[in-house]
Image (tube, coloured by chain):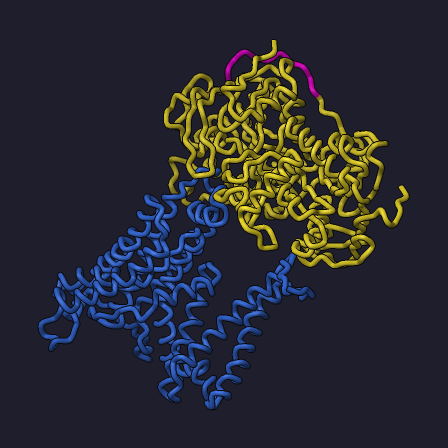
Amino acid sequence: MITFIPRDRVSKNWIMIAPILSIAFTIFFGLLIFTFLGYNPLETLYQIFVSPFSRIDRISDILVKACPLIIIGTGLMLCFKSNVWNIGAEGQFIMGALLAGFIALSFPNIETKFFLLITILAGFVGGALWAFIPAILKTKLNVNEILVSLMLVYVAMLFIDFIVRGPLRDPMSFGFPLSKPYPEGALINKIPFPGIGFLGQLHYGILFVLLLTPISWFFVNKTLGGFKINVLGSAPQAAKFAGFKQNSITITVLLLSGGLAGVAGVIEVSANIGQLQPEVSFGYGFTAIIVAFLGRLNPTGILFAGIIIATVKLGADNAQMTMGIPKVVTGLFEGILLFFLLTGETLQKYKIKWSEGKK
Amino acid sequence: MAKKESDILLKATKICKTFGNFVANQNIDISIAKGQIHALLGENGAGKSTLVKLLYGVLQPDSGSIEINNKKISITSPDIARKNGIGMVFQHFSLFPALTVAENILIALDDQIKFNKVVDEISKLSKEWELFVDPLKLVSELSVGEKQRVEIIRCLMQNPSLLIMDEPTSVLTPQEIKNLFKILKRLASSGCSILYISHKLEEIIELADEVTILKSGKSIASINAKKTTTNFLAETMVGKKITELKKTIKSKSKNIAFEVKNLNKLKNHEFGISLKNINLQVNYGEILGVAGIAGNGQVELMEILSGEINCEDNNQIFLDKTPIGKTNINERRKLGIETIPEERAFHATVPNLTLSENTFLTYFFKYNNTKNLISNLLNNPENSLEESKKIIKNNDVRCPETNPLASQLSGGNLQKFILGRSLANNPKVAIFSQPTWGVDIGAATAIRQKLLDLSQHGKAVILISQDLEEIFELSNKICVINEGALSEIFEVRDITATDVGLLMGAKNRENQQMDPIK
């Protein structure tokens, strides 16, 4: 039998060493698996870990991919910290993108970039409204938010599919399910670097992350609102004793996380796609759940977790393109990475004791 | 006391058990003779519960040996304990409220027996041992005493040679306790040994043959319970002289401080308690004790008195004759009403937050300034660092570091902190639920002294407690809560513990109305 005994104090050194060891173990087991499957192990590792960093434009691709993950993950952090289980960020992402898209397409000639403030706000409202459904059902009727938020993902997917095939389809799209292109004012541009030009797809949307992470850190650690979320998540009875209103906290965190997922949707579409199409998300809303937990539900952690997950995802794409390694194999590799990162995290806090004992 | 080898049923030698760095049991020796009532005495945290869990196989010892009938065995699970004739009645019952008595017993049996046979067996045992319960009744409809009987019957079904009882009287009325003792004595004389865990001294002297005293995880004495006194036991258990409470008589005021009128509240979940027409009043300078067995509506009453839940009618609660039924908990704090719920961790405090953050928990509104929105936005737990230091210092809260997590404190120290946090607000009315429950004697005495001081400084105190001794020691007036209804209020000199016991156990108060003693 294995028992976990809490350590009295988490060693400062191990906080640094544990992630390094975790990655070393991941590499070792990755090598083993790729060898058994008959792929050149070093080449595969190179593709997954190194090639995403091999060129500056590829590094910028990591950031582009991490951007929606970090934004959604930060919103989900607020929910999970207060024990509210919003699993439907994917749907909120889609509805945010859709509402913003509807507004963008209603002004086909707008050019000023200030219009982006309106579409981003619309994205926030769209995502927040979609999250308001589980929020109100949970607080008024005690309906489980996990089920409602998850099922609304599929409603949102089908809804956007219907919209781009029906009301918002571009007559000039030769029958493809696509909307008209967004007006100039609703597009997020790539960042030009003097002397270099563009770095891959790196766009101004990344500025939102640079603002969001410190603001959310401040909110969680230095405000009464952050304190309320923390107390509600750790001890709901104590929240009552302090006179915090559980329902309004629940509604607030769901609106915030839905809103942030919606904003991520706007940024993704406005920067990378430029029009509405049936599929806008590629699972960002679900991956962000992993990001939130891998980041240990704190804003800086989520920033790094977003980058790590984005790297491995891009590396997996590379490995598939250059070596024909199927996605499932690289998915396995992602699993190993997560396993060791979380193991390292756990072993920092607990000692393992093996005790003899039958049964 | 020399015992013959053949008389000894269970013998444990040099039992050790540690949790992390905490030593719960250190080289404990205990031997229980056949047909003996053996008491295990010690303060909270002395290691009593750990030891019995080791004997019942819930936990495994790190080292040491256990012999039953001179045969060494290793009890790796409760299953093996039962096969070796050990039965246990836990302090917190493990019964399913939605199942009947017979069903509850059936699922706990290791052998397959037909339902009807179980019902017969229960009826037989309950007659034989005067443990009256209806096998077909739902457990949720039983009183606490009846639930305990179900647990005892469950053990008796296995024909145990040793019955372990963990603090069985903490939930019983004096009458039920008497009954239980009768049964236990009969059981012992029929040859079944009993290991009886308690921290109540009178009980042990009345019931036990031998008593083993634990202190800080060590067994410090095994003595003949028939030849000792409560004083000797207390001093051995605590290790020092116990300080007496200082009670100065002072004239009480006639001004009603806090009053509840015709308060009704339906239960909000299936196994909750509805409050029925509650009326109470407490004057300044007075302690009103609310006695009652746990689970009779104390939690629900506390929620309403504290303001965690609002009254339906503003005119159900009054402070200084002003109706405040619809004010919330923080508005009441501002008016000078401080409350402490019975659950220390997770309700009065958040275990994984520091003491300063836990101070902020009930102080945060003090730092809010209606005019300055920016400072309200920046209101965070750092604001209460100074206050929490003061609370720690003024109340002798012993901390392992300057600002520890609440979970790092012992129960007694945490309670001193919680009490200090309330008192620092200088309340006019203090309503405290089970303030010394599970607290060591030293801390309990300190806490009781603070309550007395409060009333002697002219404050009104309501003390909700299941500890009858405490109620009688501190209160000026006493009432009893039973099944969500409150008895009338008696002056302490007009009522005896037996009367209170009757009120605590009255199944239906209308039929058993008691005349106030004049």
Q: In the image, is A349 to the left or to the right of A98? A: right
- The image quarter in which residue B440 lies: top right
Quarter of the picture containing the N terminus of chain A is: bottom right
- Where is residue B175? Give x, y as percent: 64, 26
Q: In the image, is A166 to the left or to the right of B150? A: left
Residue B238 on the magenta segment: no
Most foreground residue, B96 or B359: B96
Residue placed at 76% from the left, 47% from the top? B217
| Extreme-left residue of the structure | A171
Residue B252 on the magenta segment: yes
Q: Is residue A150 above or below residue B48?
A: below
- Where is residue B214? Give x, y as percent: 77, 43
- Where is residue A89? Give x, y as percent: 33, 61
- Colour chosen for chain A: blue
| Residue B282 at least partly seen | no
Most foreground residue, A322 or A29: A29
Q: Is residue B190 above or below residue B463?
A: below
Most foreground residue, B46 or A334: B46
| Residue A98 at least partly seen | yes
- Colour chosen for chain B: yellow
Main SS of the magenta segment? loop
Q: Which residues are magenta?
A: B247-257
Q: Is residue B187 above or below residue B331?
A: below
Residue placed at 76% from the left, 54% from the top? B16
Most foreground residue, B280 or B276: B276
